[in-house]
Image: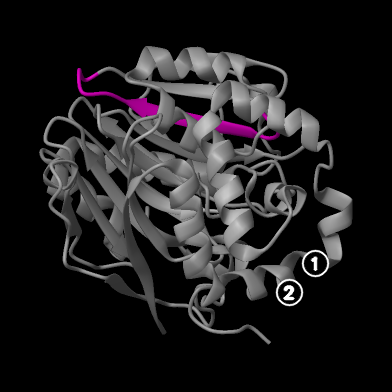
Amino acid sequence: MQQVYSDIIQYRGKHYDFGYYQGSLLKNSFILPNRKKQWGPIKDRHFIIDHHRIKELLHHYAPGIWEELHGLADALKMNIQEAIQEFGGYYLEYGRSGCSIYTEAHYMVRNYDNAPSTYEGRYLMYQPTDVGYATIGPTMQITGRTDGMNEHGLVMGYNFINRKQSSDGFLCNMIGRIILESCRNVQEAINLLKEIPHRHTFSYVLLDIHGEKKVVEASPRAVVVQESSICTNHFQKLTNENRFRMDDSLRRYRAIEQQSVNVFNPYQAFQMFNRTEYGVFSTKYGAWAGTLHTALYLPKTKNAWFALGGNREPFMFDFDRWLQGRDTNFKRIKGVLSSSEVFVNMKYMA
């Protein structure tokens, strides 16, 4: 068993200043030294080096994030090419993972499953004053998001399908960030997902304040939209994109399907995902498939619930209150994992 935590980061201001602030925090963090140790041997093979292409795409889809990269670069004394490689969301082969999402008209609940050594332990609330919408959610690769909600009540989460036949395009975490910063509702997010280049194959699950909910199956070759309340790690329509081994994905899908008939409110949905006895929460940490966090989002009230590890009560954020300028006084969210590993923000990994 390991005690783990995520730092709560709050910021209001321009993207460049936000990037600089994050860079200042990273100077005193274990995250970058650990990532360098983990990714150094494969960096030259897997990182995209067409910096002009990435600049062009970010200017088109997310000009604020381009400024954020400059702020990170300046704070960390990097050149912009290095910052793009580290934080540009265009970087590296994605490891296998397993995630689960259940959506009703007024909430989305999601388990993010991966290896603890990939997890940054950063939970972030950011309100830009230059361009883009305010967002709340956990980070991935500093600038990206694993899931989240924006000021308009648009909620996003994604599930890994495969990395075969990858192409030139953004990773899931950056696509998720761009959705949240630039889209007001599900239809705008669908339009973006049909246009933006995808590096790997993922399901993007969307919910908005009007109760509109969709699952978007996206690969470098095709993007289709389907109706479903349940999403794990296989496609329902683009079945040729599925992996050969889908046993665990199908098992979690059936577990949600069977138990959701007894779920009548968001708290019961959170328990269905976070309690270890219900079969949705996973302890397969050594296989890149253990549940690291459970997140639940309520678009109409703009509340976000969050827990690290299993059998936990949710930490509840009033995002609407935060949008009115009232910060939370809490600095960390703590949890426990049945794993020998901790998050990369916690200690130097030998």
Q: How is the image coloured?
A: one colour
Image quadrant occupied by the C terminus? bottom right
Mark 1, Cα crowd under 10 Å, few <14 / some 14-19 / many 20+, is few
Q: Nearer the viewer, residue 281 or 251?
A: 281
Q: Nearer the viewer, residue 224 or 154?
A: 154
User: Which amino acid type is shown beneath numbered disc 1?
Assistant: Gly
Query: Which image quadrant is residue 286 in?
Result: bottom right
Which residue is found at the position 32% from the left and 18% from the top? Answer: 185
Which residue is found at the position 15% from the left and 47% from the top? Answer: 325
Q: At numbered mark 2, what does the secondary structure look like: helix, strand or loop?
A: helix
Q: Which residues are magenta?
A: 198-211
Which residue is found at the position 49% from the left and 78% from the top? Answer: 339
What number is the disc on residue 37?
2
Q: Position of residue 90 (x, y in %)?
A: 70, 41
Q: Position of residue 198 (x, y in %)?
A: 66, 28
224 relative to 303 in the view: left or right: right
Report if residue 75 is visible in the image.
yes
Q: Position of residue 261 (x, y in %)?
A: 19, 35
Residue tagged by mark 1? Answer: 40
Q: Are marks 2 and 1 in contact (CB under 8 Å)?
A: yes
Check if residue 130 falls in the magenta segment.
no
In three-dimensional space, the C-alpha distance between marks 2 and 1, rounded to whole angstroms, equals: 6 Å
Check if residue 207 falls in the magenta segment.
yes
